[in-house]
Every structure is written in structure tokens, then in C-alpha cells.
Image (cartoon, grey):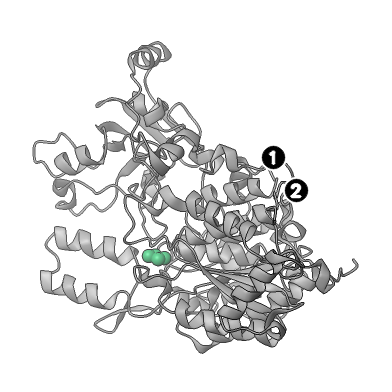
Amino acid sequence: MTTRRKKPEDLRSARWYGIVGTRGFGHRSRTAQMGYTREDYQGKPVIAILNTWSDINPCHTHFKQRVEEVKRGVWQAGGFPVEMPALTLSEPFQKPTTMLYRNLLAMETEELLRSYPADGCVLMGGCDKTTPALLMGAVTMDLPTIFLPAGPMLRGDFRGGPLGSGSDVWKYWAELRAGKITEDDWQEIESGIARSPGHCMTMGTASTMTSAAEALGMTLAGAASIPAADSRHAQMATNTGKRIVGMVWEDLKPSDLLTAGSYDNAIATVLALSGSTNAAVHLIAMARRSGIPLTLDRFDALSRRTPVLANIRPSGKYLMEDFYYAGGLRALMGNLGDLIDVGQRTVEGRTIGEAIAGAKVWNDDVIRDRAHALVPDTGLAVLRGNAAEKHLLQHTGRAVVFRDYNDLAARIDDERLDVDETCVIVLQNAGPQGAPGMPEWGQLPLPKKVLAKGVRDMVRISDARMSGTSYGACVLHVAPESYVGGPLALVRDGDRITLDVPGRKLHLHVDDAELARRKAAWKAPAPRFDRGFGALYQQHIRQANDGCDFDFLEPVNPPGGDRHEPEIH
Ligand code: FES
């Protein structure tokens, strides 16, 4: 492979800075207004640094400092860094869910890169949806791009023991509701569970997607596992700034890196991490932006041969900090052996095989080898059927149906509710359009009277998503969703439902004639929005199995081919 080498006059930014006449004068005089001389930027790659920092995003509090480190790297390598704020998508605070706005950040990313003089970009993200959103936009724009993962926060602490984001919240909330811990204990947990910058440190969506970005070759080697508070994270930020400048001269773009093979690597890595089910939605959307028609079948096929090697909560025992000290993602990918296509390339200009070569496991309980896998396969199952603690993986029960989350919240703890632990709880209208935004409501709460018996898990079905930090026998992402008349809309109280994970089946025991009657009687609900972004979302959102992208954002041409460079006059 020959390395391309751009000349300064070939830079995209030369269209802004290199032109004679009043426009070029305007760009240069306004750059001077910001305190830069011509020597600072002339003939240099302009590096857009898209920073999702904000005062309301606790996972990105260190990005104010990290962006300075990225800039330092860019300057050192002879580039011109330009920081641009981008939508923050703060998982804990944005309602009803950040998923409603993932595509808005993807659009913003694409349009920022298109409309400003960027030659290459560094994407600063980590909190759940920021990673796929930034990457989706950058993949479409197809300028040289590196993703800078925020890094996980340190382990939580409660009386000398570790606490994990999300998973311990659900665990201790159930204990509090069952009267096993006190309100004071609960408050102590509240102050110790998130004690440093960084994203959730369990294998939730954030750790899953930043790891997927690394496996795709979109980060520096080893970047995704470094805790946010570790000085090596700051060093990685500087190195990211240095590398992006080289990528611009080499014209190394996402389309050079993202292939069906690299998406397979990302899926295998996510499965080996026992990563969040949200990865299925995001990776499908990202792959389709790359022009690769990824489907759920590929996840199912790879899940049948990929062992779970990472012993990380919520499905395992440890946290991301332990994972880093045990060798991190490079070591895990090394243990996957021939399940990784080592010939795929990375932002470093070398292969992923070279990037993970020599990685060592320092704690083989945290990062298992294939002979000692936590689960030999099937970390994730794609279920098919008329309704698209282990004993629940094959279970038949009576449906208890809630028409939306408010209905569930109002009735779930009602003593008169006809429910026991053998029932199947069904939540309707929680999907991409129904909720809207397909929130992480899928870990439905158990009825109080069932909890009081000491039961901690039941089969629960919805068209919602679930936080990757949650756990339990939850069937999620049912598509098409109930709000648009999908199979879940037809389930009634008392129907019998069979979940059969090994057989990949979810079956509603209602005959076809009765289902047809129910379907004919079903009425589409009124639209939720009549204006603004919500109306745009409602009109164009794809279903979960298609990645929840907007139909009009899917590529018409190969990535970069329909870039629509702005006219400059
Ligand atoms: Fe930001 Fe979990 S809240 S990653």
C-alpha cells in the first residue's frame, strides 16, 4: 500500500485560507482577531476538535483539560487546532432519553465538519450515545478522524467495597425496597458510586461503544480502557492530537478503515466483553453509514462462536479499572485469537494485529482465555417469533400487560395486581416512536409483592432498550415496536408467552385468526409531535433492528461521495 501525501495546497482548509480576494481576507483577518498570526496556521492542517463537554455532563468533566492536551499534540505535530463544542448528550440528565437526540448529534457532527475549514477531526466522547453519534457523523463526512474515548471513572466505593455504575443502583434499590438496607445506607451509596470524571465503569453502553470504537480501529491502541483520571489518559489525549495531523497528510479516512471485517471485529469484541445490547442498534447504524448492510443476523452468527472473556459487571465481577490493570482491551482482543481479523487497519496506519501484538494479561480472572471463558458463547441472542438467573432462559408464563410506562408505574406495586413470579411482564409503547426515543426502560421493576418473596428476576418484554449496566431476564428492542402496530401491541393480559433463548424463539400462544382480529381492531395512536425536531424524528426514524438512524441520513453514495462541499464566495 502506498502512503498518500497531501501538499499544503491540497488541504481542504486552503479553500478558506488560501484564496485571494475579500473572502480569504475575511477568514485570515478573523483568525488574526482570535490572536493568531499567519505562521500559526498557514499551510497547516486545521484540526476540528469536537468536544461534548458541558456543565451538565458528569462523564466529561475532564474534557476541559483533555482538550488542551489534544491541542498540545496538534501544535507539536504542526497542525492548527480548533475546538468546537458539540451537543453534550448527558445520559443521566437528558429526558426522555439521549437516544432521542443521538441522530441530532450525528447531524451536528456532519454539518460542523462540512461547513467549517476542517481537514481532520478529533471526536471527544464517551458517555453512551456520544460515541456512536460522533462517529456516525464523521463516517459520513469521511475526513481523517480519530475518536478520543473519555475513559471510565474509578471504581465506586461503599464501606471499603467496590460499587459499579448502574448495576449496584438496581441491586441496592431492590434491597431498599425489600427493606434489607436503610435510607442512610442508600444515601452513602449515592455519594460514593460516582467519584471521579469518566463514563460508567461497568460494561454499560459507554464502555461497550468506546471499546467498539477501538476494535474498529478508530482510536489509538489501548485508548478505550484507560481510566479518565489516570495520567496515561492525558498522555493518550496528546498522542491523539499528534496522530491526527499525520492522518491528514496521509489522507487516512474512515472509509479506508471501516470494512465488513472491522465491523466484525467490533461485534466480536463487544460479545467477548458481554457488552450492552445497545451496541446492536449503534453498530448497525454506523455500519450502514459506512455503506455496509450489517444486520442482526450477523450479531447472532458471531455470538454463536464468540466466548465471553471479560469478567466485568453487570454479567461478571470486576469493573473497568480492574480491566485496565489486567491488560485492557488489547489483551482481551489478543485472547480472541483467530476470532479477530488482524489484517484490518487502524488510525495509527498499521494493522489491528500490530496494535494488539505483545499485549499481556496480568490478571487472568479479569480477562479470561478461551479455555476458561465465562460463557462459551451466546452472550447475546436475537429472538424470532410472533412476538419477536438461567432457569428463565426457557420459560412459559402468563402475560401481565402495561400499555405504557405511566401505566406500569401506577399499577406494578398494587397489591391487587394479579401477578406472581411465573408471569411475563409486558410493557408496550416504549420503542423508538412510542416512548419516544426508545429509552432504557427495559429493566422493568418487579412487583413489590414478588420482591418480598425474595424473588429478584422475572421474564420481562418490551420494545425499549436497557442500560448495559442493568441485568435480568429482559427481552428488549422488540421490532417493529408496538406503537406502530408491531406484535407486542397485540398481546393481552392472560396470553401465554414462551421465551426460549437457546431456540432463539419468543412465542405468543394465540392463534393466527385471533391475532388477525386484534390487528384489525388496533388503532394507530395520534402522533406525539406536531413541530420541531420531534416531528422530524417521528417522520424519519428507523426501527431498532435497522439501527434507529433517520432514513434520509443513510448514504446515497459511498461515504464521502455525497459530501456536498459548501460553496465559498
Ligand atoms: Fe455517562 Fe453512564 S452516565 S456513561
Residue at 28 percent of width and 60 percent of height? 170
Tag 2, which secondary structure? loop
Q: Which quarter shows the C terminus?
A: bottom right
As rendered, which of 489 and 300 lies closer to the eye? 489
Q: Is mark 2 within 8 Å of ligand 1?
A: no
Tag 1, which secondary structure? loop
Dots 1, 2 in contact, CB < 8 A? yes
Residue 454, by quadrant, is bottom left
Q: Which mark is residue 561?
A: 2
Ligand 1 image-quadrant field: bottom left
* Residue 307 visible in this rendered orientation of the protein: no
Which residue ends up furthest to the left in the rendered image?
415
Question: For this view, does 456 lie left or right of residue 413?
Answer: right
Q: Which residue is mark 1?
A: 556
Q: Position of residue 82 (x, y in %)?
A: 59, 74
Residue at 46 percent of width and 60 percent of height? 205
Q: Which quarter shows the N terminus?
A: bottom right
